[in-house]
Amino acid sequence: MISLKKRCLAELIGTFFLVYIGTGAAIITLLISKGSAPPNAFNIGIGALGGLGDWFAIGMAFGLTVAVLIYAIGHISGCHINPAVTLALWAIKKFPTGEVAPYIIAQVIGASIASFALAASVGMDAVTVGGLGATAPFEGIGYLQAILVEMIGTFLLMLVLMGSAVDKRAAPGFAGISIGFTVAAVITTIGNITGASINPARTFGPYLGDLILGGSNLWNYFPIYLIGPVVGAVLAALIYNYISSE
């Protein structure tokens, strides 16, 4: 059995790369499109490809990163890299209570370090133009709407995770591909609604970086990206357990 310390380090590293690559793609999209006129009124706050094209690219950056991380550290820590996943597995008694807090702390630290690393890599434009890839509801989207959207997106992610990685009856070797493509699909669809976090740590890191480095203060939106993903993931785990039981 690999020690908790080593598993938490794996979670920290995994969440670091998830945020560095995923939000990095969002930041670069915004920097590339700086100064270009958006092609339609709904294309607010993202790049020049027409909205959906940008979100597909960002979604693939997140999804491919999740896929390769599952193959890299899944056998070490389980590759949760998401507090909502950790809490959902705990809720169905597939993760020990004493390891929940260490895993979540490691994930949040990894995400936060990634945001500061992006600022160091790109410069202050990553904060002032790219907002460090922070998530927020888009124009016309209400608070409860955003929670619902994040809940639905994370529900699908957790359902696929349960079926492809947690269930011992799943075909071996396909978890990374299945989960990664799910992340990419969800982000492509809900990106222009909530920013598509589906992961409280992914939102926490950029929020902290923006706050400390002089960017936008978006903490009033954080409950959206905590409540929605956690409720969605826990519901998915419970429902999967019910529908898959013999």
Image (cartoon, rainbow, N blue to C red):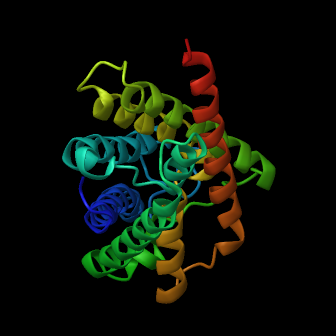
174 over 113 or under it: above or below? above
102 over 168 or under it: above or below? below
Residue depicted at 34% across the width and 56% down the height: 18
Q: Position of residue 64 (x, y in %)?
A: 28, 42
120 over 49 or under it: above or below? below
Considering depth in this image, is 224 or 118 the residue closer to the camera? 224
Q: Position of residue 227 (x, y in %)?
A: 69, 54
Q: Number of labelled discs?
A: 0
Determine whether, in the image, residue 40 is placed left or right of residue 185: right
Residue depicted at 54% across the width and 17% down the height: 244
Determine whether, in the image, residue 148 is placed left or right of residue 174: right
Considering depth in this image, is 120 or 5 the residue closer to the camera? 5
Considering depth in this image, is 239 or 224 the residue closer to the camera? 239
Residue depicted at 66% across the width and 36% down the height: 235
State the image quarter where residue 7 is shown: bottom left
Residue depicted at 62% across the width and 60% down the height: 136
Considering depth in this image, is 104 or 57 the residue closer to the camera? 104
Residue farthest front in this picture: 1
Residue farthest top in this picture: 246
Residue farthest left in this picture: 72
State the image quarter where residue 226 is shown: bottom right
Q: Position of residue 215 (x, y in %)?
A: 53, 81
Instruction: Answer whether residue 130 is visible to the viewer in this image.
Output: no
14 over 211 or under it: above or below? above
Determine whether, in the image, residue 118 is placed left or right of residue 235: left
Instruction: Answer whether residue 167 is visible to the viewer in this image.
Output: yes
The quadrant of the rendering that contains the C terminus is top right
State the image quarter where residue 200 is shown: bottom right
